[in-house]
Structure formats: structure tokens, C-alpha cells
Amino acid sequence: MLLKTFGWSFAITALGLVAAVFYGGWTAFGVVAILAILEISLSFDNAVVNAGILKKMNAFWQKIFLTVGVLIAVFGMRLVFPVVIVAISAKMGPIEAVDLAINNKDRYQQLVTDAHPAIAAFGGMFLLMIFLDFIFEDRDIQWLRWIERPLAKLGKVDMLSVCISLIVLLITSFTFATHAHQHGGAHADKAQTVLIAGIAGLITYMIVGGLSGYFEDKLEEEEEREHEEEEAAARGGKQRSAVKLAGQAAFFMFLYLEVLDASFSFDGVIGAFAITNDIVLMALGLGIGAMYVRSLTVYLVRQGTLDDYVYLEHGAHYAIGALAVILMVTIQYEINEVITGLVGVVLIAWSFFSSVRRNRALAAAEGGAAGSGEKSEVSTTL
């Protein structure tokens, strides 16, 4: 099972490390290995959240996620995306941007760094909406009840998550503009860019998330109708029609997953520049890490880990909330990538051990109930 799920990741790791040695020797090998570990540590919470969505898809769409989705994640976000950002921000053609990335790495790094406020605003708002919509939903299973109970009650207010996100964006852009003005106005024009990028992130979430949620609800309704038709067909001996809506629902959930992965990859791409500004090494290292995140997602789905450890999804969403805040803060202040990675790891580890304690308590309660039942049977027999 482990080899089947992670086989491609192991193969890509071997190929990527060998390619790094041929490209730049053992130094490049070390850089690629470090980047892969950075990507995995920063995106573990991404895998947990992805698994919660992917488990609703059938085997076909899980394969699409591992094939087409990997191409988008590895080549699109880790290789093409930084080049596109440079092309847009520097107002140059894509060929010029690629030439710059290969032949003038310092200038390329500077342009990507200059574009960071807009990238962070877009990704931060998208991730913040995911966290807020999760935390404001009333759930049967609650992890940190002292936080989640009152917030679930507040969540009954319509559009509350959108209002809070817009307030956060306005405060961030206003603070950024004020700071830029006090220090000579070098980045004053970027305050407007931050505001526009943040609104774009919010709109993207509402469109993609809304469509995937809409089709998911439709799919559930269709499944109920399908079940009723199946029973009627069994009684009448007729063939029932195939459900066509599942494809649409799965497609929009897949699209939602890709946008989600893009938002998660922002901090990894930006953080990678602290290690190297070589676009080839960056693509190799982050690509290997992205493969493991994909494989880990499928592993969690197939093992039913989220069903066994019910607080994991909560921990991942808290990590998303922390990452959203960190991205918004990095618009103005620098935060070490190690801190970003550790926050997510700590929250997920905490939720995992909380799940283990819950499972043990439930098992002990069931054992105690079974024991008392046996005693009562014995006393009745006697």
C-alpha cells in the first residue's frame, strides 16, 4: 500500500536528485533536498485539507488529481507561476522573463520579491476565507470547544466571514500604505495593488468555492434520488439512467483543490528564495515536495485517517488560519520560513494526539459499558 501510493514520489525524488547532481554537483543536490523538505513541512496541512475534499471524489478523479493535478502543481505553480509574476510586474514578455530567470538570477529574485505583497494578499485572503468558513460552521465534533462553540453561534450571521476578511484586508493595506508613506513612499503605490490582489483572492474563493459547494450539494441530492430510483428499478426490473452530475461536481472540486494548492504554494515559492534563486533547483526541490504532498493526500484518503483521527482536519484548518495571518503580516514584515513551517506542524501534531486521546477514551468507555453489561447478565443468570 505504501509503495503503491508513494511509488511515483520516490521515483521523482531519485530522478530529481540525480538531475540536480548533473546540473550543479553535490551542492545542488543538497539545495534540492532542503527545498523538498521545506515544501513538505510547509504543506503538510495542505495534504490534510486536500484529503477532506478528495475523499468525496471517485477513483477516476483521484487519479486525475495525481496526474494532471501534479503537472499543474509542479510545473504550473513551482516553475511557471514565478516567471508569470515577473513578466506581469516587470511588464515584459514571458520569453524575456525566462531569459532573466536563467541569466540574471539576482534581478529575477528581486522582481519576485517586489511582487510578494500582491502574492501574499491574494493567497492570504483565499486561505483566511477557508479558515473562517470552517470555524464559523456548527459541527457535531468540536476540538477546541471553548473557541469553536461561540464562533459557531456567531457564524449564523450571514456573510460574517466575508466582512471579517475585508476588514483584515483594509487594515493590512492601510497599515502598509502608512508605513510606506512614513519611509519615503517607496512602496506607496503598492498599497493599492495589495488591496486589489486581496479582493481578487476573496472573489476567487467565492466563485470556485461556491461552485464546488453548489455542485457538491446537487450531487448529494442526485445520489439520494439515484438510491430511490435503484430501489424502484429493482422492484420493476427496469434499467435506471446513469448520473451525469457527478462529473461536474468532481470537476469543480478538483478546480477548488488546484486553487487551494496554489494558495498554499505561495509561501513555499517565496521562502525558496531564501535558499536559492536558481529557477531550475527551485523547480526540482519544490516539485519533489509537491509530489509527496499529493501522495500523502491520497494515502490519508485511502487509509481513512481523517475518519479515525477526527481532530486532524480541525488542526489543519487552524494551521491554514495561521498561515493566512502570516502571509498578511509578511506584506510588511519578514517572517522566517522555519516559523511558518513549525506553526503548521505543531497544530497538526496537537490535533493528532488529541484524536488519539479521544479514541482511547471512547474505547475505554465502550469496554467499561461492555463489562458492566456482562456483569448484569451474570447476576441475572444467577
Image (cartoon, grey):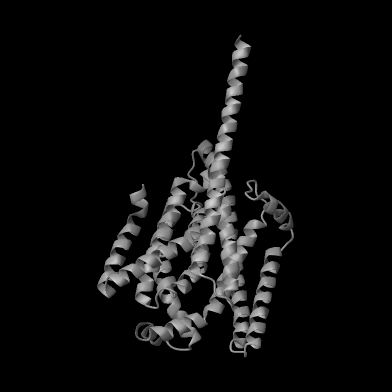
Farthest top residue in view: 382
Which of the 4 image quarters holds residue 184? bottom right
Q: In this view, does 97 lie to the left or right of 221?
A: left
Along the line of sight, the residue nearer the viewer: 164 or 318: 318
Indicate the position of residue 335 as horizontal and vertical percent values.
54, 71
Which of the 4 image quarters holds residue 152? bottom right
Farthest left residue in view: 22
Q: In this view, does 105 lie to the left or right of 49?
A: left
Q: Is residue 81 visible?
A: yes
* Rendered residue at 60%/16% (across/down): 377
Asked if residue 15 is positioned above or below residue 331 in the image, the reply reads above
* Rendered residue at 60%/10% (across/down): 381
Q: Can residue 207 be seen in this view?
A: no
Indicate the position of residue 123 as horizontal and vertical percent values.
55, 71
Q: How many marks?
A: 0
Along the line of sight, the residue nearer the viewer: 198 or 243: 198
